Structure formats: C-alpha cells, structure tokens
Image (cartoon, rainbow, N blue to C red):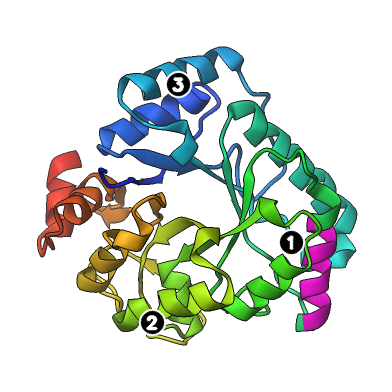
Amino acid sequence: MSLIIGSHVSFSKDEQLLGSVKEALSYKASTFMFYTGAPQNTMRLPLDDNLTNQGLELMNKNNIDINNLVVHAPYIINMANDKNYDFNVAFLKEEINRVTKLGVKRLVIHPGSHVGLGEDVGLNNIIKVLNTVINKDTYPMICLETMAGKGSELGTNFEQLKYIMDNINVKDKVFVCLDTCHINDAGYDLNKFDDILNEFDNIIGLDKLKVVHVNDSKNAINTHKDRHENIGLGTIGFKNLNYVVNHDKLKDVPKILETPYVIYEDKKYPPYLFEIDMLRNQKDNSNLVNDIVSYYK
C-alpha cells in the first residue's frame, strides 16, 4: 500500500473542494486536510455542490480516497470553557453538518483550554459538549488532537484523552489525532517512538488513532510551546519523523503535514511538495529551503 500522506491545503470561496484537490495534486499528495472556513472566525460560505462534485471527480481520477481526507475544526471552538457552551455546541454541530455534506469522515478538533477553571472542570466540559453534539448517527469520526500543553491546554497526555473518551456516551464516534510537534513539546520522546505507540496502545488503543499530524518542532522536548518547524530542521529531526510516517503499524493512517511556509525576501513558499518527497522516498534533503525557493521563485 502506498504512503497516505498530504498536507494542509486551502479551501477558497471560488473553488472550495475542487481547489483543495488541485493544490494537493500540485504537492503530489495522496490525501489532504482543510478547514471549511477561516479557523479564527465564524464566517462560513455555503458549500457549492457543483464544486464538491468536481473535486470528488478529480480525486477519483487521481486515486485520492475520500475516506482518507481530513477536515480540521476551527480554533475558536473551546470545548473546555463552559462560558462558551452554547456557542461551542452550535458551531460544532454546524461544522459536523458541513463535513457530512462534503462526505469527509475525519474531523480533527482541539480539546480546548480550561482558562483557569482547572483540569478536571475543563475535561468534564469537553465531555459535556461532545455528549451534546455526538449521537449514533454522527457521520465523521471526531478526532481529538494531542496538544503541546501551552497555557491551560488539555489533551496534553494520553490519560486526559482516555478520560474524555471513556465518558463519551457514543464511544465509537471519538478517536485521536496525534501531532508529532505537540507530543514532543508535551514531553514525549520521539527518539523512542515505539515506546510511545505502546503506551498509546495500552492506554487508548491503536485502533483509535485515525490521523497523524507530521510536524518538526522549533522547541526542545517538554517545553509546552507548540511551534512547528519544517521536516528535518527542528529538534525532532528527519530520522524520527520518517520513522513515524513509514511505521508499519500506522500504514492505514493518513499523515498530514502542517509545517510552516518558507519565507524568502518577504515571500512565502509552500514546503509540501519537497517534504512529501523526502518522506515518501525516506531520504533527508539538506538543501530543502533552497530547493523550495528555487522551485517557486
């Protein structure tokens, strides 16, 4: 089976899913992730069925399986803060409806930050929102993302995620997205990834791991900062990330790059064509930045 790998791509008002597919193909990706609207606000354009169908047709022509696509829920949903309970429920329901209409089966969401309420209260607020929103007919898999622990973030260890999942009424709808930068910054040593997988399996179960975000980190382990770096240029390193991406136990799990654009002379260039090539061929590229700039300049 070929590597299921892609990156975050745009979802523009003019082309929507069709544009997302075109961008993914430009990176030679076999899957991709997108937001259905800006992650920082509530503005959402109606979905265009014609553009969706054109996107699906282009995916079929290029052997991109819709079952491997990922949508990321917006950051403005903070399930851990009950002051925003009504908003969280309403907006997450609407996002699930949009993902369902698009036919995408994996929806990644940050668990949230307790903003001074305390870990226990925050975790139970997350559970309350999810139990309100999720039912037996919910279409996408709700994938809680592992977080770095910046500020009062929750979901920074497997035990917290396990607690949430154990208290969900419809347990077969909730899963996990593992982010390599986040777990590094939260204190998990990616030099020992097999140990991490074993711990995850023992606490949560590998069958619950449905998305991997592949990011290097600008920060040392256990610094709780959450700053992504390009593949091979951070503290995790190419060797460890390549091991994650090509791990046999994760061969059926979509891997999504969220690495930063390369900035050169005040212009930004996407790194994904080259980073996907590195990981697909399992070969580091010490000339990564120059190759990206030369290609797009």
Q: Amino acid at mark 2?
A: Asp
Residue underneath mark 2: 195
Quick one: label 3 or label 1, which is nearer the N terminus? 3
Q: In percent of the image, x 22 and y 69: which residue is there?
A: 238
Examine the rendered structure and indicate whether residue 259 appears above or below residue 41.
Answer: below
Q: Secondary structure at mark 3?
A: helix
Residue 163 at x, y percent in the picture: 71, 75
The residue where tag 1 is placed is 78
Q: Between residues 260 and 50, which one lies in front from this camera angle?
A: 50
> Residue, x 52% and y 26% (percent of image)?
16
For the record, the magenta segment spans: 120-130
Q: Position of residue 103 (x, y in %)?
A: 58, 29
- Name the quadrant of the N terminus: top left
Considering only order in the chain, which callout, 1 or 2, is on the residue closer to the N terminus? Answer: 1
State the separation of the CA atoms marked 3 and 1.
Answer: 31 Å
Residue 147 position by quadrant: bottom right
Q: Which residue is label 3 attached to? A: 55
* Left or right position of 15 against 260: right
Residue type (three-letter) at the residue carrying disc 3: Gly
Q: Is residue 150 visible?
A: no
How far, Cα to Cα, is label 2 from label 1?
Answer: 31 Å
Asked whether 125 falls inside the magenta stretch, the response is yes
Depth check, mark 3 against mark 2: the one in front is 2
**Residue 115 lies within the magenta run:** no
Of residues 124 and 27, the one drawn nearer to the viewer in this rendering: 124
Of pointers 3 and 2, the one earlier in the residue sequence: 3
Label 1 amino acid? Asn
Q: Which mark is residue 256?
A: none
**Mark 2 nearby-residue class (10 Å; few <14, some 14–19, many ≥20):** few
**Which secondary structure dominates the residues rendered in magenta?**
helix
